[in-house]
Amino acid sequence: MRNWIVGCATGALLLAGMMLAPGLKAQEKGDAAKGKMVFEQCSGCHATDTDDVIVGPSLKGLFKRKMLKDGKPVNEANVLDMINMGGGGMPPFADSLSAADKANVIAYLKTL
């Protein structure tokens, strides 16, 4: 009986991992050129080629920085969280951008 329970639990974990893997790969990889096109809607508030503050902070060199404006380390997870949740006057984009769009924007931000 115990072997059956352990086997079922292991199978469930493997299945869950396989279902999550495509989503993780989509977040890990992005197309910077597509991300630049998606980012156009962000450019009204965020500069990318100067350090000027338009409405929100400039994102020039974002992934070369140590910290975000909220004090969190600059990494994909925290940038994605900021895109999803917004903050500091920025609206959330969790529901208005697809996972692929977000991955593409992050890939673009890494080129700045």
Image (cartoon, grey):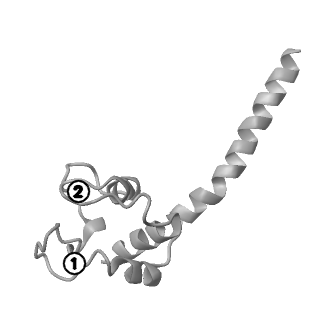
Residue topped by disc 2: 68
| Dot 2 and dot 1 residues touching (CB under 8 Å) | no
Secondary element at tag 1: loop
Q: Quadrant of the C terminus?
A: bottom left
Q: Is residue 99 above or below residue 16?
A: below
Secondary element at tag 2: loop
For the point 26% across and 67% down, the residue is 62
In this rendering, position of residue 34 left or right of residue 17 = left
In terms of image quadrants, where is residue 97? bottom left
Spatial separation of the CA atoms under disc 2 and disc 1: 19 Å
Q: Residue 18 appears at what percent x and percent y?
A: 71, 50
Residue topped by disc 1: 44
Of residue 20 and residue 62, the one placed in the foreground of this image is 20
For the point 60% across and 58% down, the residue is 23
Q: Residue 50 appears at what percent x and percent y?
A: 15, 81
In this rendering, position of residue 46 left or right of residue 1 = left
